[in-house]
Image (cartoon, grey):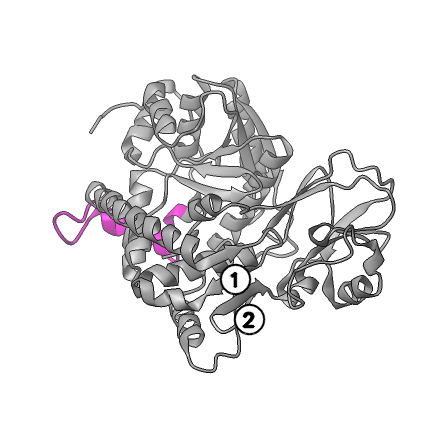
């Protein structure tokens, strides 16, 4: 393993392995701590970047710290933006998880607006070791113990990349010392009410020989190869057992369950749930197991999990579609907009002068469609009746004006382009198991 300060060449080589194009514009998540300051400084020496600083507002000093970080970055020629988390009140439970989700959402949305496809974070070898040990304590299997992936889809065309997963923490601080750069120490990093802090201190003085960051990170790397193999067979099974439709629903052939081991179809069910539900995180393994048992039972009558409904369709086919009550509310379309975690709509050259909203068709919309079939382009549609209320509709002044997936349009208006984020099976395969442990 290399020692001493981190070089720009090493980081660029890591980005190459993650398949980040040399021409790609990059954003870097910068907290002001040593890790992210190091990554920003090293990357900025190779290509133009923008550092994204999130003022989380969880501590009184957060705004001042964000401003100080911005000043330090500006001083060394790194472009930066401060993003503010606007929360009504500080979360009471699981603060770190809520703050992490808010940070990624803010940064992803900024990247989408500014047409940046890659967001870099400074997670390093020691972070990876902590993650593996924490997941081991929670009883995770192969997928969880494979640790953090080098790349993860955030939706809206933005990919999170981690080029430092093979780099130990001490090399990052050595880099900052060489560059004479300062950083901020987050007091929460010493707060032992957080599991990660407890884990970090355990690894600093391990009770067993070999329980070290380098060894745990190497274990994660080996398990990632096992995970990749399982995902290969899971994608193959999806191709054989599932028909995916652009409108966000799918047909599952339950007779195919007998063809593969249980773990393969359980993980495939998770992919189905993410396709039709748009959720960023997988349901717990026990809930997936209950779902599979229900699907395979005699007299199956239906099951709902994570905002997705599974319903009998024919003798061997099961209809998989969005639960209406779980869908995102209507929202204004501005530029390239994501809705319900599933669909992307580009305002483009829409000729409508009114504010345009995207939202669930719902039962009222379904009834309106049935009463106005003459507004369909070809006068008919083949989408199952249970799925109709879950379709995205376009609204102007609370009036339904279009349902793209069935060709329903009012007037001679040029409408925006709507697409499902996981339009192809290959994309579904790439996005499999987000958050799954």
Q: Is residue 199 magenta?
A: yes
Numbered circles on residues, count: 2
For label 2, the residue is 313
Where 399 falls versus 80 (above or below)?
below
The reply, left or right, for residue 75 in relation to residue 17 is: right
Q: Quadrant of the N terminus?
A: top left
Where 368 falls versus 333 (above or below)?
below
Residue situated in front as seen by the camera: 7 or 12:
12
Q: Which mark is residue 251?
A: 1
Where 393 falls versus 347 (above or below)?
below
- The crowd level at tag 2 (other Cα within 10 Å; few <14, some 14-19, many 20+) is some
Q: Quadrant of residue 172?
A: top left
In percent of width and height, residue 29 lies at 49, 35
Q: Are marks 2 and 1 in contact (CB under 8 Å)?
A: yes
Q: Which residues are magenta?
A: 189-212
The reply, left or right, for residue 35 in relation to residue 75 is: left
């Amino acid at each position: 393993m290399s020692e001493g300060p981190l070089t720009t060449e090493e980081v660029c080589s890591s980005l190459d392995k993650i398949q980040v194009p040399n021409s790609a514009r990059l954003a870097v998540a910068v907290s002001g701590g040593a890790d992210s300051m190091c990554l920003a400084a090293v990357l900025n020496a190779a290509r133009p970047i923008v550092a994204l600083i999130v003022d989380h507002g969880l501590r009184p000093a957060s705004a001042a710290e964000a401003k100080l970080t911005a000043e330090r970055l500006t001083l060394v020629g790194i472009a930066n933006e401060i993003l503010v988390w606007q929360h009504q009140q500080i979360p009471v439970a699981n603060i770190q998880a809520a703050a992490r989700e808010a940070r990624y959402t803010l940064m992803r949305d900024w990247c989408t607006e500014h047409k940046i496809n890659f967001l870099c974070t400074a997670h390093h070898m020691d972070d990876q070791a902590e993650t593996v040990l924490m997941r081991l304590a929670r009883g995770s299997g192969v997928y969880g113990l494979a640790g953090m992936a080098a790349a993860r889809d955030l939706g809206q065309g933005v990919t999170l990349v981690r080029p430092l997963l093979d780099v130990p923490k001490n090399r990052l601080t050595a880099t900052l010392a060489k560059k004479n750069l300062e950083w901020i120490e987050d007091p929460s990093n010493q707060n032992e009410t957080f599991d990660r802090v407890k884990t970090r201190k355990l690894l600093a003085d391990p009770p067993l020989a070999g329980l070290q960051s380098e060894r745990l990170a190497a274990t994660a790397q080996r398990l990632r190869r096992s995970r990749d193999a399982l995902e290969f067979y899971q994608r193959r099974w999806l191709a054989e057992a599932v028909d995916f439709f652009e409108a966000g629903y799918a047909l599952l052939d339950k007779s195919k369950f007998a063809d593969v081991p249980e773990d393969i179809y359980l993980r495939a069910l998770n992919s189905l749930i993410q396709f039709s539900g748009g959720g960023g995180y997988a349901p717990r393994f026990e809930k997936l197991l209950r779902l599979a048992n229900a699907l395979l039972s005699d007299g199956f009558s239906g099951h709902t999990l994570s905002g997705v409904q599974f319903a009998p369709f024919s003798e061997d086919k099961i209809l998989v579609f969005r639960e209406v009550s779980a869908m995102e509310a209507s929202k204004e379309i501005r530029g390239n907009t994501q809705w319900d975690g599933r669909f992307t709509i580009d305002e483009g050259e829409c000729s409508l002068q009114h504010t345009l909203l995207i939202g669930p068709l719902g039962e009222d919309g379904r009834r309106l469609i049935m009463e106005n079939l003459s507004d369909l382009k070809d006068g008919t549609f083949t989408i199952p009746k249970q799925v109709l209320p879950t379709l995205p509709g376009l609204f102007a002044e609370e009036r339904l004006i279009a349902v793209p997936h069935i060709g329903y349009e009012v007037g001679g208006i040029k409408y925006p382009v709507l697409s499902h984020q996981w339009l192809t099976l290959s994309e579904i395969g790439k996005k499999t198991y987000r958050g799954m442990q």
